[in-house]
Amino acid sequence: MPIHDQSYRHYGGGRGVPGRSWAVIAWAGIRSFMRKRAFMGLMLFALSPFVVRAVQFWIASQYPQASVLAPGPETFRQFLEQQDFFVFVITIWIGSGLIANDRRANALQIYLSKPLMRTEYIAGKLAILFVFLSLVTLAPALLLLLLKIAFDGNFAFLKNNLFLIPAIVVGSLLQVMLASFTMLALSSLSKSARFVGIMYVGITFFTTAMFGALYAITGTSRVSWISVGANITQVVDVVFRLKPRYATPWQVSLLVIIALIVVSISILERRVRGVEVVT
Amino acid sequence: MDTAAAAAANVVALDGVTVIYGKNQALKNVTARFVKGAVGLLGPNGAGKSTMLKALLGFVKPDQGRMTVLDLNVAESPLAIRARIGYMPESDAHIPGMNAVTFVAYCGQLAGLPAVDAMQRAHEVLQYVGLGEARYRNVETYSTGMKQRIKLAQALVHDPDLLFLDEPTNGMDPKGRDEMLELVRDLGHNKGVSLILSSHLLPDVEYTCDHVVVMDKGQIATQGPINELKGPTGRVYELRIKGNLPGFIEALAKEGMDTHATDEDVMRVFVPDALGNHQAIFKAAAQFGVQVRHLRPSVPTLEDVFAKAVGED
């Protein structure tokens, strides 16, 4: 008797309800990156500003003569801005291949032949980026706030700056959402993760360079809405109740961010399909 | 068989389904029935077989028509359907960066199996398809034949009621092809899994399936049990002649006898019951003035059914 006659059995166990496949996709993606030593090294390195800030907070709380180091609300804004670089690098590292690699390996038809919707697939992939990006923005920023309270031994700082909690959450999420959606959309446009990475870098630097050039020519920062990064900077400044650093109204910057996310969702809706129809 | 019983015997039904890609009509008002068991979906390249499978999976939305799979409407219950079917795509397909057992278990989880059960099923199914020894290797390092097997494994891991197999023997060496066909046959005949085998290879369908749906140019050319389609309507002869071959073929066609060439210089002639037996061929040869050098009764094959259905000569 051939060996295969002995090994195929019908399955008699339970099955989950549809709608949870995004979590399976997310967890598989997270695990695969956690197994990469170089990536985990980057994640640890991305937390070095957090460690520095934590030490700063501790010194300021322990030594009154070091009051120059005492953090204010703007310190948290500065921390998130420092993390921009890591958000950029991690987004490219993780995001460029998230859909591009699946397209290269024709995996979309495997995914979409299972009982999951396209939105679940996209949500699962987004969750991978969300988790890692939040680990270098939202999570350490909130933890810093907790450390500040713990080192002070009272809630005075928090009471005086209660807006910091929503500001950190909204500011971080804006950063994370824009990076995640735009990168995922770019990743769905190609079968080459390398090409996607180059596209992302190109768009980021090109728009910033364009803004720089126009700023130099016109002498006004009213055109900051051209730069993807400047829009985030502008809106997050406002969220932290700081004076916006560019002349563009923050509402315009917010509109640009929303438009970029909407366009990304539209691209994903068109590109994530079980079959590529070429007419 | 009454209507309800007939409906219950069908695992897939299409009614007037049309799929249009741009200006190209891939499926033209297709009405077909796929019964329980192993059914071959046969047709030349570009006939619309893969489009039909993709429409049934919900990848392609038909421009008109209605489709049901396992008595569920494709337009209304795509997820419930996909939970009960397994799809083995034609092209190479895998999840990058995973070894075989992780990949198959992952597919099981995507299909709704708990993680532990999915892993156990993955080991069993990989053993079944003959990849037991290679299950810890990265799928990207697999040969073409192994990639075909793992595609079958991922389609089987959640124990589907119905399998869609799109050209499962593509790119396989003869030994691997035989083993794959053996697996498909075993699934359809011994394991109680209904399957639709899409192929342009007649021997594959003839070996593994009991029923066939023949497609050509986006339409159904013929459908039914293979034995019935091969059987009663006439006789088939192998024939070799000396003389004007194209002219003689034309003469046979005028008399109502279909011919089609084989790999050798022997052609196969289909003589309808109405024309009697081989005497009709001799009569035509005498009238046309060609010599009959070889004439032998032959068993009708699926090739004859296919050739007759799609009008090949």
Image (cartoon, rainbow, N blue to C red):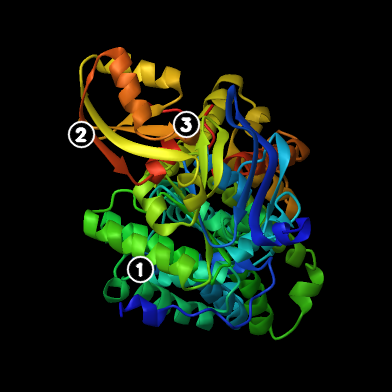
- Measured in 3D between alpha carbons, the distance from the residue under mark 3 to the one under mark 2, in whole angstroms, is 21 Å
Position of B147 with respect to A135 (left or right) is left
Does mark 2 fall on the same chain as mark 3?
yes
Give the residue pinned by disc 1. Answer: B99
Picture disc at residue B161 = none
Q: Amino acid at mark 1?
A: Asn
Residue B47 seen in this snapshot: no
Give the residue pinned by disc 3. Answer: B310
> Eyeballing the image, is B156 above or below A212?
below
| Closer to us: A228 or A64 | A228
Does mark 2 fall on the same chain as mark 1?
yes
The residue mark sitting in front, 1 or 2, is 2
Q: Dot 3, how many residues are within 10 Å of its Cα: few (below 14), some (14-19), or many (20+)?
A: some
Give the residue pinned by disc 2. Answer: B264
Kind of element beneath mark 2:
loop
Q: Please give the chain letter of the residue carrying mark 1.
A: B
Does mark 3 fall on the same chain as mark 1?
yes
Q: Are marks 3 and 2 in contact (CB under 8 Å)?
A: no
Q: Amino acid at mark 2?
A: Glu
- State the count of labels: 3
- Measured in 3D between alpha carbons, the distance from the residue under mark 1 to the one under mark 3, in whole angstroms, is 43 Å
In x, y percent, where is residue A177? 64, 53
Q: Dot 2, how many residues are within 10 Å of its Cα: few (below 14), some (14-19), or many (20+)?
A: few
> Eyeballing the image, is A41 above or below B48?
below
Q: Please give the chain letter of the residue carrying mark 2.
A: B
